[in-house]
Image (spheres, rainbow, N blue to C red):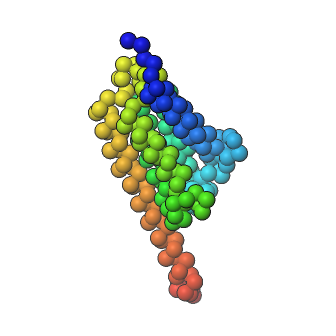
Amino acid sequence: MACLNRKDLGLLALRAAVGGVLIAHGTQKLFGWFGGGGLEGTAKAMEHMGFEPGRQSAIASGLGEAGGGALLVAGLATPAAGSIVAGTMAGAISVHAPSGFFAMGGGYEYPALLGACGLALGLSGAGCYSLDHLTRHRFDGAGLSLLAFAASAVGAAAVVARRQDVVRRREARAADDEAGVGLA
């Protein structure tokens, strides 16, 4: 049966666009491509944002974006790819959330959109124009989907909670320093 329909073309276009953006952002973090900071610069930025340790956080973020994006473009293990993207964007959302929704004000609009696209693609599947289709869906079954989304949710929650703890400790330390607590 021939597989040529608008839905599958739309999924291919969405996977290519979202995955391409994620690959670009991930390679900025990992390799410094496209004007990015590379691992060293990203590690410093991650530490500053409260993701400790910075180097491991930079690697995880870069791999989540570049790897998840590449899997989306290929349409391979699409539920896992979508969950990786959604989980990675949860960390980015936690950084931008204090600035509100709109990206114009530094808000979380952009990572939320990328995360939602990853989630939707992971749930919908890649369509006919994909490696999942070519491999007869060996890597995108219901069991893998459930496991991938559960693992991503647990991982994202742990990363965000740890970051929030680091940020709270820093704020408390800064308030103590401002009040003169701990000065000899």
The answer to whether residue 70 is seen in the rendering is no
> Is residue 27 placed above or below 2 in the rendered structure?
below
Task: Say which quadrant the N terminus sits in.
Answer: top left
* Residue 63 relative to residue 28: left or right: left
- Between residue 162 and residue 130, name the one nearer to us: 130
Residue at the spot 53% in from the left edge and 42% down from the top edge: 65
* Residue 127 relative to residue 100: left or right: left
Name of the residue lying farthest toward the front: 6
Residue at the spot 53% in from the left edge and 80% down from the top edge: 175
> Is residue 150 placed above or below 126 in the rendered structure?
below
Task: Say which quadrant the C terminus sits in.
Answer: bottom right
> Is residue 150 placed above or below 125 in the rendered structure?
below
**How many dots with numbers?**
0
Residue at the spot 41% in from the left edge and 40% down from the top edge: 120
Name of the residue lying farthest toward the left: 143
Give residue 162's quadrant in the image. Answer: bottom left
Residue 47: x %, y % from top left: 57, 59
The answer to whether residue 109 is seen in the rendering is yes
- Between residue 138 and residue 129, name the one nearer to us: 129
Residue 140: x %, y % from top left: 36, 29
Residue 23: x %, y % from top left: 58, 37
Name of the residue lying farthest toward the right: 35
Residue 103: x %, y % from top left: 58, 57
Residue at the spot 50% in from the left edge and 48% down from the top edge: 113
